[in-house]
Image: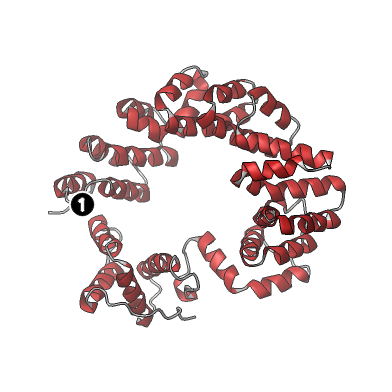
Amino acid sequence: MRAAPIAAVPQPASLTLTRIIEDFLGVDWSDTVALIRASGELHALDTGGVRQAWQILETRAHTGTHQEKALALYLWSRLARLDPSLRLPETWSRDMNPEALLAERVRLSMDGIRERLISGQRLDEAERKAFFRELAARDPAAGLELWLKVSNHLEHLGEISPFGVLLRDPALRVTTLAKVRSAARSPSDASELIAALAAPWIVADLSASSAWIDTLNDPDLKRRLTSLLLVTSGSALPATTFEVTENLPVDRRIPARANGVAQLAYEDPVSGMLLIDKVSDPSERAELIRVFGNTFAMHDTQSWLAWRDTLPPAEHDAANSAAFTSWAVLQPSEAATWLESQPAGQAKDQLAAELVRITAVDKTETAIAWINQISNPRDRLMAISMALGNLAPGDTQKMETILRAALPPATAPR
């Protein structure tokens, strides 16, 4: 399939643009310096340049190289923001981001997928979700009817939320609720479906959704939605939030409480701390500490440090990992010392890359030292890119210092 034509826009000279494309397509990905330079020239293109680059790439014979696929996806991702109808040719799409490519394939195959669903064929979970997300964007009323008809409601409950837009419109709300109740297998199932449908609206508009909830006469539905409202708003006292989530299944209780403590981390952190103190299950505590700590540290790092020190020592690592970026900005030396003590692996490499980004400007030698501790080549390249990206465009001396010290002698610039 050929890409959709895009009107040419006068932008850099074609010879220069062709040279930029050829440089990227010919770059040796093991040569980090060359890769960074070639990528930088692409990033510098404005929209007109990207349009012309797409046209040039479209006229070339497709080679199927990794470089060509990377270039096609980069140009497509930039242009698709301006022209959603732009389609990525299949020959360019292998080995690219699976979620983005699945959404694109689903967008091109909506009629066929609909027929498969109606005929009773099973779709894998990712394809179903992508299909119903797209259908909700196109025609939410028809999409909800189809979902109710072809789905095992409780098994596929996570797919219904995109249709929640129907509840926001008072003119559609009554009809929507009637359809759900008619299709549900029991009143309890109907309440669960409506709660899942309403959840995004509650998050997006607490005031309007709260006013609607107050008008409901169904006690079970009102209880479920009120619980969602309390957890989402973060306005309940810790004891109340704890009580309204106590009887939820664990796979819903933990996310509900995590959402609640994340809200409390901004609005009432002390209440969030008290809520976490009430939880004894280790896995639930770990998730609440992770979510609460990340949000709280971004909001008030000094207070987060004081709270972290009240936790049992066994929970310090989880708290430090969750809030590492905020902590490293405030106390880079302490964060680095802790990171040194962590076992080698991907988690450590990713935190190290973040530390590199933070220290690249003011503590370049520290950034270099951490780049050299990252064992995974891709994580190492990411760290170098983050370090260079955080420097001012004209700070060439630090750029060269990082490249010379962090890259093997064969690839360092001379």
Q: Which residue occupies the extreme right position in the image?
A: 186
| Residue 199 on image: x %, y % | 67, 46
The quadrant in which residue 261 appears is top right
Q: Give me the residue at 67% from left, 75% from top.
A: 111
Q: Is the residue 246 above or below the residue 198 in the image?
A: above
| Residue 94 on image: x %, y % | 48, 68
Q: Give me the residue at 48% from left, 24% from top.
A: 316
Apparent side of residue 146 relative to residue 208 in the rendered image (left or right): right
Q: Quick one: 110 or 171, which is closer to the camera?
A: 171
Q: Quick one: 291 or 374, which is closer to the camera?
A: 291
Which residue position is annotated with label 1? 393
Query: Is residue 61 among the parts visible in the rendering?
Result: no
| Residue 250 on image: x %, y % | 70, 35
Q: Quadrant of the C terminus?
A: bottom left
Q: Give me the residue at 30% from left, 50% from top.
A: 385
The quadrant in which residue 92 appears is bottom left
The total of numbered circles placed on residues is 1
Residue neighbourhood size for the residue with mark 1, other residues' Cα within 10 Å, grouped as few (<14), some (14–19), many (≥20): few
Label 1 element class = loop
Q: Quick one: 343 or 230, which is closer to the camera?
A: 230
Apparent side of residue 314 relative to residue 66 in the rendered image (left or right): right
Q: How is the image coloured?
A: secondary structure
The amino acid type, in three-letter code, at marker 1 is Pro
Q: Is the residue 104 above or below the residue 330 in the image?
A: below
Query: Is residue 202 among the parts visible in the rendering?
Result: yes
| Residue 165 on image: x %, y % | 65, 56
Q: Quick one: 91 or 230, which is closer to the camera?
A: 230
Apparent side of residue 169 relative to residue 87 in the rendered image (left or right): right
Q: Give me the residue at 74% from left, 68% from top.
A: 117
